[in-house]
Image (cartoon, rainbow, N blue to C red):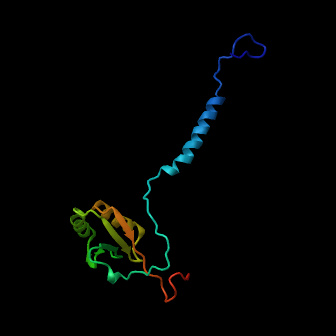
């Protein structure tokens, strides 16, 4: 124990400086690690390959499922317009016994992000485990690798 200046009594107060140092270090660690703990959905983004030609929506094989979110709140399930609940019931029945549970998703430009994520979550809940994102083919008649 330390002795005070000019007195013969020992100092009985707690030295809080090391405690404050430890608390500040823990605070910094939690501030750095908290943003990393958010929930994430992992996706695989394909590499660009210029020799691949875009597939028009009319030539999709019949065994593949294409789900398109519409701006009016409904969805197109393989070109048939229906409500989200009806589409999810059909997806659940179709994917129940399938070993490969792949579905392709597209959305109109007028669809809000919230609606698109709602449809994707419902499809995942209906049994789809791999979702391929479809995009519109590039505009214009230029080469496939041409930037606009």
Which quadrant: the N terminus? Answer: top right
Q: Residue furthest top?
A: 8
Rendered residue at 64%/29% (across/down): 18
With respect to residue 16, does 4 lie above or below?
A: above
Q: Quadrant of residue 80?
A: bottom left
Rendered residue at 52%/86% (across/down): 143
Rendered residue at 54%/43% (across/down): 30
Q: Residue furthest bottom?
A: 141
Give left or right: position of 16 versus 54: right
Q: Residue furthest right?
A: 6
Which quadrant: the C terminus? Answer: bottom right
Give left or right: position of 50 versus 112: right
Rendered residue at 36%/66% (across/down): 131
Residue 67, horizontal then vertical, whole percent: 32, 72
Give left or right: position of 21 versus 61: right
Residue 103, horizontal then vertical, whole percent: 32, 69
Q: Nearer the viewer, residue 83 or 38?
A: 38
Residue 113, horizontal then vertical, whole percent: 42, 68
Q: Nearer the viewer, residue 74 or 96?
A: 96
């Amino acid at each position: 124990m330390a002795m005070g200046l000019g007195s013969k009594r020992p100092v009985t107060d707690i030295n809080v400086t090391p405690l404050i140092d430890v608390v500040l270090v823990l605070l910094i660690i939690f501030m750095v690690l908290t943003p990393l703990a958010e929930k994430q959905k992992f996706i695989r983004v394909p590499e660009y390959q210029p020799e691949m030609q875009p597939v028009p929506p009319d030539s999709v094989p019949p065994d593949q499922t294409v789900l398109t979110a519409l701006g009016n709140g409904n969805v197109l399930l393989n070109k048939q317009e229906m409500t989200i609940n009806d589409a999810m019931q059909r997806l659940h029945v179709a994917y129940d016994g399938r070993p490969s549970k792949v579905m392709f998703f597209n959305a109109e430009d007028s669809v809000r992000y919230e609606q698109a994520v709602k449809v994707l979550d419902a499809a995942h809940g209906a049994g789809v485990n791999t979702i391929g994102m479809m995009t519109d083919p590039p505009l214009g008649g230029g080469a496939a690798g041409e930037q606009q």
